[in-house]
Image: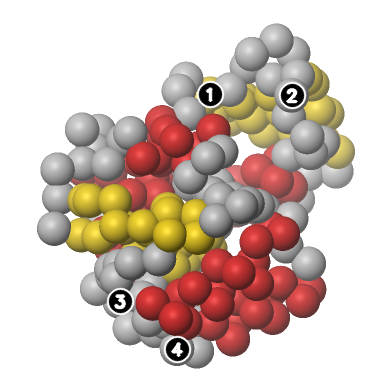
């Protein structure tokens, strides 16, 4: 049984993660903006915010366990804390825990530079950041010149990367149908991370070590 500590449990994704744990995971402890209920854990999954970076890395040191960071917006100081933490623990950091998005990033990287590229990203109206962290990741991977951000209704998330090649275009689209996909990705990454030596890992490190067909099986 894998004991998981959820940081940011009172948030939307923290709640989804808590209710998505598979049979081989058990909730050992949790934290939100007002409390930290510590307990021995095999891995921490952080779905809080960049503001909690100092607290979550300190907790990884205290519990002496791996850490999955599923937040965006870290400052240079935050990145320094994460890098230091990874000198003693296995740390996986990704701005998006979607397996599909991370495969899309790999494809965008292979197409980078073949023509003019732009991104259209759509999220729900309560989304705070614009452009999204995922759109910025896709821009870096694809070399896109612009990001067009739409905030409409209750859209979970849609990202379209369009490459213009003169008389033809290539369009790559990812649509998130349920927020649980981010929880599933974090769980799969955490299961992999607990068997890795200390160091700083990306979601791509996890993808490259796994067989793709099995990645899309639901965790429940």
Mark toward the start of the polypeptide (3 vs 1)? 1
The residue wearing badge 2 is 126
One can see residue 163 in this view: no
Asked if residue 74 lies left or right of residue 18, the reply is right
Callout 4: helix, strand or loop?
Answer: loop
Name the residue rendered at 73%, 39% in the picture.
132
Residue at the outermost top position: 153
Mark toward the start of the polypeptide (2 vs 1)? 2
Check the image and report above or below for 23 versus 171. below
For residue 206, which quarter of the picture?
Answer: bottom left
Q: CA distance from mark 2 to mark 4?
A: 37 Å
User: Would you call the spot at circle 4 few (<14 residues within 10 Å), some (14-19), or many (20 or more)?
Assistant: some
Check the image and report above or below for 177 versus 62. above
Q: CA distance from mark 2 to mark 1?
A: 18 Å
Q: Nearer the viewer, residue 171 or 25?
A: 25
Mark toward the start of the polypeptide (2 vs 3)? 2
The residue wearing badge 1 is 175
User: Would you call the spot at circle 1 few (<14 residues within 10 Å), some (14-19), or many (20 or more)?
Assistant: some
For residue 208, which quarter of the picture?
Answer: bottom left
Name the residue rendered at 36%, 40% in the picture.
18
Q: CA distance from mark 2 to mark 3?
A: 37 Å
Asked if residue 170 lies left or right of residue 128, the reply is left
Mark toward the start of the polypeptide (4 vs 1)? 4
Residue 196's disc number? 3
One can see residue 94 in this view: yes
Q: Nearer the viewer, mark 2 or mark 3?
A: 2
Residue 88's disc number? 4
């Amino acid at each position: 049984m894998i004991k998981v500590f959820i940081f940011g449990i009172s948030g939307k994704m923290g709640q989804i993660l808590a209710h998505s744990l598979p049979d081989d995971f058990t909730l050992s402890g949790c934290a939100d903006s007002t409390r930290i209920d510590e307990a021995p854990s095999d891995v921490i999954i952080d779905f809080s915010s960049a503001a909690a970076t100092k607290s979550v890395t300190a907790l990884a040191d205290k519990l002496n366990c791996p850490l999955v960071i599923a937040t965006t917006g870290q400052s240079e100081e935050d990145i320094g804390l994460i890098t230091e933490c990874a000198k003693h623990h296995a740390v996986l950091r990704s701005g998006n825990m979607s397996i599909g998005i991370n495969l899309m990033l790999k494809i965008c990287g292979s197409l980078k530079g073949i023509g003019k590229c732009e991104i259209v990203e759509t999220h729900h109206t309560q989304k705070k950041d614009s452009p999204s962290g995922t759109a910025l990741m896709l821009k870096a991977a694809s070399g896109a010149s612009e990001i067009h951000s739409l905030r409409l209704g209750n859209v979970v998330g849609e990202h379209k990367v369009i490459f213009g090649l003169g008389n033809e275009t290539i369009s790559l689209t990812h649509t998130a149908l349920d927020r649980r996909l981010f929880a599933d990705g974090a769980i799969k990454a955490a299961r992999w991370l607990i068997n890795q030596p200390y160091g700083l890992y990306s979601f791509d490190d996890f993808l490259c070590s796994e067989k793709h067909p099995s990645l899309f099986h639901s965790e429940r």
